[in-house]
Amino acid sequence: MPRIASYSQLTRTKDPTELAAHYIQLNSNIEAKLHTAHETRIFYLSVPDSAHVSTVKMVKQQAMPAPGSTVRFVIEKPFGASLADCQQRQASLEEQGLRTEEIWRLDHYLGKRGVRNILDFRLNNPKWEQHWNAEHVASIEVVVQENEDVADRIDFYSETGVVRDMMVNHMMEVLATVAMELPGDAQDLAQVPLARAALLESITPLVQDDLILGQYEEYDAHFEEHYERNPTARQNPRGEHAPTLGYAKLSIPIQRWNGVHLALCMPRVWPSAKPMCASSSKVARCYSFTSRVAPGTSSSPPRLLHPP
């Protein structure tokens, strides 16, 4: 079977004087695997959004393919802290010489089998789809319960918190997949992102009373231990109050979902952790997808940062 792709990973370093050498080595590793000089290169940036521009700049300097080759930069969420910030980051990437079509902004949660199954189920069960509305559904809750703490991700969580890490991207995309109007042509998958976007635009903007934020009990200790071990790390002044628990009550005032209880719930370090999208019908309760429960949970209650 012919090889259709190969993978090379950048060696991580904390020494800025060694950074260029690592990108040069990355380029050498890629070129050693090429069949032709014009093979497509896809650079996957699994880095904090604050490092997007600097990473692209180093790739442009040290690891670009021959002129005329296809290049793509895949950028993970979160992409900016607001619409204006997102637009500024996009402009900064374009200032590095990237064209819009060369920048792919990705939410990897949409590739999870359970999430893909939601869309497949809806597309392939038209009889069930006709009951998927406010007349038959009382509530929809997207819940991601994780028993892993953020002790090893304090720098990241200090910048993002649970809202930017999970709720406004992964969980909203799941909700949109569950609640959107299906495209008229079920085979035209190019229309699916447009249908998701239309659903997201119809959500009523949240007010303060719609949101509960909190932290797991041991977060303060993890925060202090991290900076004791890393005294030179840049400490985000808001990091001490970064939420690890979030609950958002939503409203979608369209005919299909008018009056239906909709919510996102994301607690970290929670007993019996499991992600699920639960829908409560007016006659029965069903679960769209679940995953295996992981062992070793904590029973400590969360500490509220912003009670309702």
Image (cartoon, helix red, strand yellow):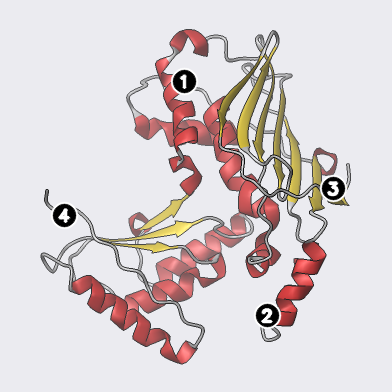
- Mark 1, other Cα within 10 Å: few <14 / some 14–19 / many ≥20: some
Task: Judge by depth and name the residue closer to the eye, 43 or 219.
Answer: 219
Residue at the disc numbered 4: 3
**What numbered label is drawn on residue 122?**
1
Distance, label 3 to label 1, CA atoms, is 37 Å
Residue located beneath label 2 in the image: 234
> Residue 70 appears at what percent x and percent y?
23, 60
Mark 2 Cα-neighbour bin, 10 Å: few <14, some 14–19, many ≥20: few
**Marks 2 and 3, Cα distance to the nearest angstrom?**
30 Å
Q: CA distance from mark 2 to mark 4?
A: 43 Å
| Secondary element at image label 3 | loop
Q: Do the residues bearing badges 2 and 3 touch, measured as CB atoms within 8 Å?
A: no
**Secondary structure of the residue carrying numbered label 2:** loop
Against 116, is 129 above or below?
Answer: above
State left or right for residue 122 relative to residue 217: left
**What residue does disc 3 label?**
301
In front: label 4 or label 1: 4
Residue 305 lies, with reference to residue 140, above or below; the image says below
Give residue 197's mark: none
Query: Which amino acid lies under the numbered mark 3 shown in the image of this protein?
Result: Pro
- 193 lies left or right of 40: right
Q: Residue at x 85, y 40 (%)?
A: 209
- Alpha carbon distance from label 4 to label 1: 35 Å
Whole-percent x, y for residue 89 in the image: 52, 65
Q: Residue at x 54, y 65 (%)?
A: 49
Q: Is residue 78 above or below residue 220?
A: above
> Can you tell which of label 4 and label 3 is closer to the viewer?
3
Are circles 1 and 2 on residues that touch, CB within 8 Å? no
Which residue is at the front of the view, 21 or 61?
A: 21
